[in-house]
Amino acid sequence: MAKRPSPQWDEKKRQQWLAFVQELSPETDPRTIRLVGLLHRVAHALYQISEGSLVEAGLSYAQYRLLMNLLFCERFEGCGALNPSEISERQGIGRNTVSALIRQLEEDRLVERHLDEEDRRKFNITLTDAGRKLVQEYASRHFHTVHDHFNELDPAEQQAMGQLLDKLAQSLAVQQGA
């Protein structure tokens, strides 16, 4: 079996890739493809760091985000619960994925399911005391871990990066019809 290439590319390999892209799509500026690749690498690395910061808590990053959404809703939006559709929309994930996350968090006694008082066909998800305590305990650790990596950028670089990413996000939202 052939040896798989290293995921870390040297400059020569990167230039070959960009030339390959240009060959397949001459009208495409290869710098944009390079930026997409960099964004993907950074996003993937941040995701892995986020996952790693939560291992001790026994949570996946998706579970942690769900718990954080419930806590935020509880504290700042005056709602004590979210239904699965709202969770799906907030997290940008499918309803089946949300259902699986809720099931696991229920088994771990971190969330509870309650029938909606206005519509008995629906149910709402709330944090348990254990879920609230766990997310509060690990939020600081998680945020600190992510913060450490962004400290590689000075405040002006962070601001510029934020502005550029906001601009790109707005452009993408318009194209998606959001």
Image (cartoon, helix red, strand yellow):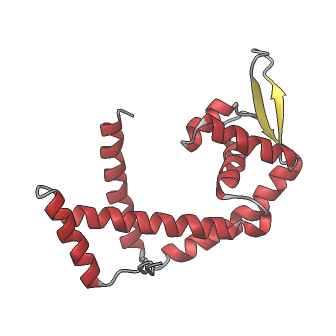
For the point 35% across and 37% down, the residue is: 176
Left or right: residue 123 versus residue 84 is: right
Hey, which quadrant is residue 92 in on the image? top right
For the point 75% across and 15% down, the residue is: 119
For the point 24% across and 84% down, the residue is: 12
Question: How many numbered tags mark residues here?
Answer: 0
Q: Is residue 164 above or below residue 100?
A: below
Hey, which quadrant is residue 121 in on the image? top right
Assign the C terminus to one quadrant of the image: top left
Q: Is residue 178 above or below residue 109?
A: above
Hey, which quadrant is residue 165 in on the image? bottom left
Residue 41, given in percent of the width and then of the height, sits at: 43, 68
Q: Nearer the viewer, residue 63 or 1?
A: 1
For the point 30% across and 38% down, the residue is: 175
Residue 160, given in percent of the width and then of the height, sits at: 34, 65
Task: Please indicate, yes or no, whether residue 160 appears anywhere in the rendered image.
Answer: no
Left or right: residue 151 versus residue 169 is: right
Left or right: residue 128 versus residue 91 is: right
Q: Nearer the viewer, residue 17 or 105?
A: 17
Q: Is residue 29 above or below residue 78?
A: below
Residue extending furthest toward the front: 1
Q: Is residue 96 above or below residue 6?
A: above
Task: Please indicate, yes or no, whether residue 11 appears anywhere in the rendered image.
Answer: yes
Residue extending furthest toward the left: 27
Residue 34, given in percent of the width and then of the height, sits at: 28, 67
Residue 120, given in percent of the width and then of the height, sits at: 79, 16
